[in-house]
Amino acid sequence: MNKKLRKAVIAGNWKMNKTRPEAKALIGELAPLVKDADCGVVICVPYTNLETALEATKGTNIGVGAENCHWAESGAFTGEISARMLAEMGVQYVVIGHSERRQYFGETDVTVQKRVRAALDAGLTVILCVGELLEQREAGITEEIVGMQTKVALGGVTKEELAKIILAYEPVWAIGTGKTATAAQANEVNHYIRTVVAGLYDQAAADAMTIQYGGSMNAKNAEELLDQEDVDGGLIGGASLKAPDFAAIVKAASR
Ligand code: 13P
């Protein structure tokens, strides 16, 4: 019932893929396929593709995001990009706390919180990722893990600022593995995350929160996942690199 109150958002996370000409070609193919979408459509691309993506999506319904940002406004942080630099370019979204950043680049709940703060201060909309490892699921602590990740990341975020937050539940064992969470598993954890948001703020805030699922979502399984009451869209890796596949997921979310 509350699902209708929320906006579904399908976001692509290109990860470390596509040169500029490849990015331009993919967006050129994608734009006409998603132009009638009845959901939010976003592509999060490597920093080197942001300018190309902003140019290629002009006049379309596709929003553009980065895949990370630093928490400082500027300074001696070699190799980093600030939220302000992104906002100044016209970037609207940023993925924060992706499990690949947590696994390979030392991201912690605390640095996620700092990045969320910086992104909100710069006016960006955050796609905030949480999710458990396989060992954690097997140990029966999925709720503890995603609950803590959500609580720490939202530390200091006001109720008004929640309008600029999209949550994404991405079980780490389902990312890039072809092993999707079942629709019931995705819905169960998404629902739990919503109760955490209700506990931190209130039920109205939780009901309004877009909570995506991510992890091997594709053209075939999207419909079943997106039909779940607490699944409000998807964060798509591999399938976002092929225009027809990504468009099929957007279509499934638009029904
Ligand atoms: P896959 O869709 O490739 O499993 O990746 C999911 C993901 O990590 C999106 O952020």
Image (cartoon, rainbow, N blue to C red):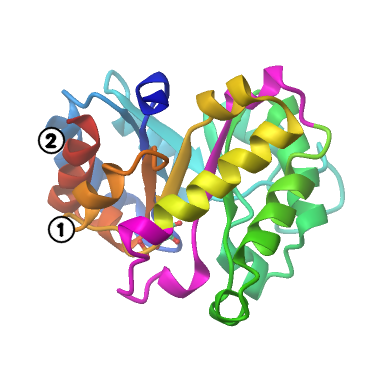
The front one of 46 and 10 is 10
Which residue is located at x 18 percent, y 49 percent? 243
Q: Is 70 left or right of 9, judged from the image as shown? A: right
Q: Quadrant of the N terminus?
A: top left
Q: Secondary structure at mark 2?
A: helix
- Which dot marks residue 84? none
The front one of 242 and 214 is 214
- Give the CA separation, mark 1 to mark 2: 17 Å
Residue 52: x, y in percent? 38, 39
Q: Secondary structure at mark 1?
A: loop
Magenta stretch contains residue 176: yes
Which residue is located at x 53 percent, y 79 percent? 134
Task: Residue under label 2, please give it.
Answer: 33
Outermost residue on the right side: it is 76
Judged from the image, the quadrant occupied by ligand 1 is: bottom left
Rendered image quadrant of residue 120: top right
- Please, is residue 244 above or below residue 9 in the view? below
User: Do we see residue 88 in this rendering?
Assistant: no
Q: What type is the residue that disc 2 sits on?
A: Leu
Residue 61: x, y in percent? 29, 23
Magenta stretch contains residue 19: no
User: Do we see residue 75 in this rendering?
Assistant: yes
Residue 128: x, y in percent? 59, 45
Rendered image quadrant of residue 34: top left
Q: Is 144 left or right of 53, judged from the image as shown? A: right
Q: Quadrant of the C terminus?
A: top left
Q: Nearer the viewer, mark 1 or mark 2?
A: 1
Task: Residue under label 1, please give it.
Answer: 220
